Amino acid sequence: MLRVSGRFRHPKAEDCLVVKTDDYGIAVDDDVTPKKEIVSDANFLEELDLLLFPPVEKVLIEIFERARVPRLGGISSGRGWSSISTFQRCPYLWFRKFIEPLPASIFPAMEAAALAVGTIVHTFLAIYYTRMITPGYPFTPELVRDQLLLKANPDHVHEGWRVFLNYALFYQREEIMPLAVEYNLQDPRTGESCPYDLIAYFPTTIGDRLAGTYNIEHKSASRFDDNMLDGWSNDGEVIGQMMLWKRLGLHHKFGELRGTIVNLLGKQKEPQLYRTTVGANSWQVGQHEKDLRVWGAQMQHAVATGNFPRARAACIGRYGKCDLFEHCATNE
Ligand code: SF4
C-alpha cells in the first residue's frame, strides 16, 4: 500500500471499490458513493414551470414600473421581524439569507405556489383599499389581474383572484375607513422596521371588536386550524408593530391603537374568512423591546465571531421544509 497524507491507498481490485483506508484498514473515501441525483423529475418540471412563468413579484414590479406607480406591497427596508425570526429559527439560515447569501440557483427552482398566491392576494387587497382612500388611483384589482395573466403563472393568478373576490364580496358593505395602506415604518435610531398592511378606523362597535383604529394584517391560508385561527397573540411581527406604533408616536397621526386584526383569507375549496383581534398589551410590548435588544446583541456576536450554527430542529417547520433543506442535507 502507498502512504497518502496519513491515509492508505487501496490497490485496485476487481472485487473491491475501496480507494482509501485509515490505519485500521477501514474505508475512508467517499468517492465510491454515487452522487445523489438532485434533479428529480418533479424538480425538472418545476424548473420548466419557472422558465415558462417568471416569479410573480418580478411581473408585479414590471407592471407598477411601467405605470410609474410605486409598488404596493413591496418589501420593507431596515431590520425587521423577518431577519430576527430567521435568526431565532436557525443562525445558519440567517447567515445565508442576510449576511452571505448563497447563489439563487441553490434555492428551490419553482416559486412556491403559496407565496405567489399570497403576494397576489396582498396586491389586490392593497389596491382595493387604496382606491377607498384615493378614488382616482390608476390601478384596479381587475386591471392588475389582466396584466398578470399576460406573464405570470395563470394558476396562481386565478387562485389569487378567487380568494380576493370572495373577500371583496363578503365585506363589500363593511363600515371601514382605511387610513393608510402598505405603510412602512422604520425607527431611524435603531433601524428596526415593520410594514403595516392596512391601518383603518372602524366607526362602529361590532361584537367584541370596539370602534377605533386598528392595524390589519392580511394572511392567506389553506387550512384554518387552531394555530392559524388562534396563534397570533405571541406573534413577534404583530407585537413589533404595536411596539413601533407606540415608540414612533403613530397615535398622533392615526389615533390610539386598539389592536391588530389578523385578517385571514382561506384558500379552501369553498374559501372561508376569519378575523381575530390581538389587543395592544403594554407589558407584552415592554417584554418584546427588551427581548429584541438581547437578540440584536446575539446577532452582532454571531457576526463578530463568525459562528452561525445550524439549528437542525428547525429544518422542517410550520410551512414545510426550510428553503436550504437540500443544501444542508447534501452539502451541495
Ligand atoms: S435546513 Fe435546517 S440547518 Fe439548514 S439552514 Fe435550514 S433550518 Fe438551518
Image: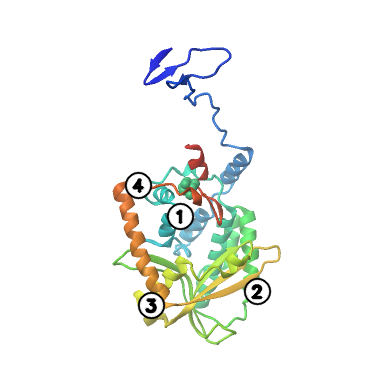
Q: Amino acid at mark 2?
A: Leu
| Gap in angstroms between the C-alphas marked 4 and 3 | 38 Å
Sequence-earlier tag: 1 or 2:
1
Residue at the farthest right position: 270
Q: Position of residue 306 (x, y in %)?
A: 32, 46
Q: Nearer the viewer, mark 1 or mark 2?
A: 1
Tell which of 223 and 204 is nearer to you: 223
Q: Amino acid at mark 1?
A: Arg
> On the image, which quarter does residue 13 sit in?
top right
Q: Are marks 4 and 3 in contact (CB under 8 Å)?
A: no
Q: Nearer the viewer, mark 2 or mark 3?
A: 3
> On the image, which quarter does residue 116 sit in?
bottom right
Sequence-earlier tag: 2 or 3:
2
Structural crowding at the residue carrying mark 2, measured as other residues with C-alpha within 10 Å and reported as few (<14), some (14–19) or many (≥20)? few
Q: Secondary structure at mark 1?
A: helix
Structural crowding at the residue carrying mark 4, measured as other residues with C-alpha within 10 Å and reported as few (<14), some (14–19) or many (≥20)? few
| Gap in angstroms between the C-alphas marked 2 and 3 | 31 Å
Instruction: Determine which residue is flagged by label 2.
Output: 169
| Residue 22 in the figure: left or right of residue 115 | left
User: In the image, is residue 12 above or below residue 295?
Assistant: above
Q: Amino acid at mark 3?
A: Leu
Q: Amino acid at mark 4?
A: Asn
Instruction: Determine which residue is flagged by label 4.
Output: 307
Q: Position of residue 232 (x, y in %)?
A: 52, 69
Is the residue at mark 2 in contact range of ligand 1, meaning its CB lies under 8 Å from it? no
Residue at the farthest bottom position: 204
Instruction: Determine which residue is flagged by label 3.
Output: 250
Q: Are marks 4 and 2 in contact (CB under 8 Å)?
A: no
Query: Which mark is on residue 89?
Result: 1
